[in-house]
Image (tube, rainbow, N blue to C red):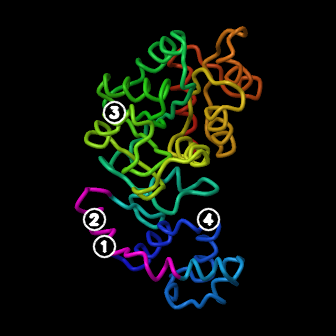
């Protein structure tokens, strides 16, 4: 394995480091040639952290058995795709803060599919939400189409299952590591996706789910695709955050409107007020995706 790739993966396993601090390492030395030679004083300067935190980082870099970890991943068919790899998804690389490493299980070729669409929504959909997914998304799906979602209960689960049922492909982006699938109820679905589709996380496999992981995860869901469909979302929900990130990333946002009396539709309807494209049928999505792709 290329030494730079290995060092980036090593840094991603250091829980003390933020995205920006890994960026600081690469700004200071783009090849990371001297990573293991830095003193705590050096680390304090590079990372702009207190001395005791710099000592902790030094200890992590000395004690994490990265080669043993990588050997274990290989045995378990876990792929580590770093931002410098050719396999890294092009659209995701262009967001503001792309993950340094994507941990993957399954079919990496799905990253290269042209027709990709993110789908997000409430964890507690009504029958209207399920009907809307069937009506708008089902006609789009074919064997060269990828649905990206977050493996959450509700709309996410329905989107993954619809793609599988229609013999399309799906990517699930986790807010935890592969050894701690969340929610546990979706472990069978995660296994199905890992075997026949693609399971992705920016978190190393031992990582347990945490509240703050999921808003971060959402930028990957939107960043992997040209557009995001929002189905039933409350204001200030995770789905609303995903849609807002998609807008910031310059991607298309499609909103399936709902009744004004339905609390689960208030976020979606607000997105339409903010400029998201109101979607009533599959054609509304296809025309915008093709326009987006023609301008890439």
Q: Which residue is mark 1?
A: 68
Q: In the rendered view of the protein, which quadrant contains the N terminus?
A: bottom left
Q: CA distance from mark 4 to mark 3?
A: 30 Å
Q: Residues within 10 Å of mark 2 (few under 14, many from 20)?
A: few
Residue 160 coordinates in the image, percent (x, y): 40, 29
Q: Secondary structure at mark 3?
A: helix
Give the x, y percent position of residue 166: 32, 23
Residue found at x 48% / y 15%: 130
Lower sequence index among marks 2 and 4: 4
Secondary structure predominantly adopted by residues drawn in magenta? helix
Q: Residue under label 4, please give it.
A: 18
Q: Please report the residue visible at 57 percent of the width from the left and 89 percent of the height from the top.
A: 38
Q: Secondary structure at mark 1?
A: helix
Q: Give the mark nearest the N terminus, 3 or 2.
A: 2
Q: CA distance from mark 3 to mark 2?
A: 23 Å
Write the start and end of the magenta stretch as one range. 59-78
| Numbered disc 2: secondary structure | helix
Q: CA distance from mark 4 to mark 1?
A: 23 Å
Q: Which residue is mark 2?
A: 72
């Amino acid at each position: 394995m290329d030494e730079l790739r290995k060092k980036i993966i090593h840094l991603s396993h250091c829980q003390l480091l933020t995205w920006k601090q890994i960026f600081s390492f690469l700004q200071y030395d783009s090849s990371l040639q001297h990573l293991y030679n830095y003193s705590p004083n050096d680390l304090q300067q590079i990372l702009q952290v207190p001395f005791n935190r710099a000592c902790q980082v030094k200890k992590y870099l000395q004690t994490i058995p990265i080669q043993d970890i990588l050997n274990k991943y290989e045995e378990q068919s876990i792929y580590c795709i770093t931002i410098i790899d050719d396999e890294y998804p092009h659209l995701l690389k262009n967001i503001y803060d792309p993950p340094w490493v994507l941990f993957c299980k399954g079919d990496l070729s799905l990253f290269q599919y042209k027709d990709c669409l993110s789908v997000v929504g409430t964890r507690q959909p009504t029958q209207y939400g399920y009907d809307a997914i069937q009506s708008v998304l089902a006609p789009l799906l074919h064997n060269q189409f990828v649905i990206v979602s977050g493996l959450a209960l509700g709309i996410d689960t329905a989107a993954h299952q619809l793609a599988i049922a229609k013999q399309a492909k799906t990517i699930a982006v986790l807010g935890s590591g592969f050894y701690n699938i969340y929610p546990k109820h979706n472990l069978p679905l995660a296994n199905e996706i890992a075997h026949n589709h693609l399971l992705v996380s920016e978190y190393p496999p031992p990582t347990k789910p945490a509240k703050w992981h999921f808003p971060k995860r959402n930028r990957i869901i939107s960043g992997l695709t040209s557009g995001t469909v929002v189905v039933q979302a409350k204001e200030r929900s995770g789905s609303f955050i995903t849609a807002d990130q998609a807008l910031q990333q310059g991607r298309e946002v499609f909103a399936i409107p709902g009744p004004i009396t339905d609390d689960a539709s208030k976020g979606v309807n607000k997105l339409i007020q903010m400029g998201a494209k109101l979607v009533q049928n599959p054609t509304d999505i296809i025309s915008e995706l093709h326009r987006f792709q023609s301008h890439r």
